[in-house]
Image: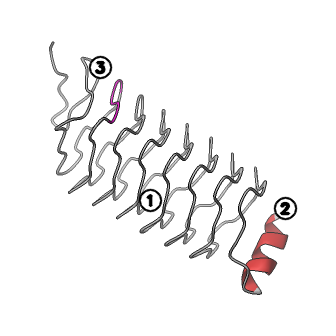
Amino acid sequence: MSAEELLAEYASGRRDFREVDLSQAYLFECNLQDADFQGSNLSRIYMPYANLGRANLQKAILHGAELSNTRFQSVNLTDVDLTQANLFRADLRNCQLQRANLFSANFQSADLRNADLSFADLCGANLDSSNLDQAKLIGAKLSRCTLFRAQSVDLDGAEVDSTTVFPDGHRFEF
């Protein structure tokens, strides 16, 4: 499916886009609230400043996606693949990110308040200056993860090691 077809069908009222291939699509500043992209291939998509509020992206593939400043409020991102995605300053408040693959993703200055990151793979992720107030990190893997200047981080139950950079800039000595 092309970006043009997607936007035309969305404008006509369609919201079910499960298992579509939109890899490498250009969707700058698009509004796709309440859309269902479950299981879709959105790898390397260019979608900064988009509005995906309340969308379903469960099990979607967003490997290497450009999603800076995108609004994801209350989005289902359970089991999503955001490996190496750029989510700089993205709004991920109240998102479900359980078991998500967030390996080497950039969440710098992102808003993750009330997000559920339980059992997510955040190895190598950059959470520098992000807001993690009330975020759940139980079972989250934080090896090589940078949390420098991150706000309100609760690491109870998270998997950290000597390569994890904590909010104060230090590493934990085991």
Q: Earlier in the sequence, mark 3 or mark 2?
A: 2
Q: At 41% across and 47% down in the image, what residue appears?
A: 98
Residue most extreme to the top? 174
Give the crowd class for mark 1: few <14, some 14-19, many >=20 residues within 10 Å.
many
Q: Which of marks 3 and 1 is nearer the N terminus?
A: 1
Residue hosting label 3: 163
Tell me how far mark 2 sits from mark 1, CA to CA.
25 Å
Q: Where is residue 171 in the image (x, y as percent from the top left)?
A: 19, 22
Q: Where is residue 3 in the image (x, y as percent from the top left)?
A: 79, 66
Residue hosting label 1: 90
With respect to residue 50, does 124 lie above or below? above
Residue hosting label 2: 1
| Secondary structure that dominates the magenta span | loop
- The local secondary structure at tag 1 comes to loop
Disc 2 and disc 1 in contact, CB within 8 angstroms: no
* Magenta-drawn segment: 140-144
Give the crowd class for mark 3: few <14, some 14-19, many >=20 residues within 10 Å.
some
Q: At 76% across and 56% down in the image, what residue appears?
A: 22
Tell me how far mark 3 sits from mark 2, CA to CA.
41 Å
Residue type at numbered disc 2: Met
The quadrant the N terminus occupies is bottom right
Q: Is residue 128 left or right of residue 60?
A: left
Q: At 47% across and 64% down in the image, what residue appears?
A: 75
Q: At 35% across and 64% down in the image, what residue appears?
A: 94
Residue type at numbered disc 3: Thr
Q: Which of marks 2 and 1 is nearer the N terminus?
A: 2
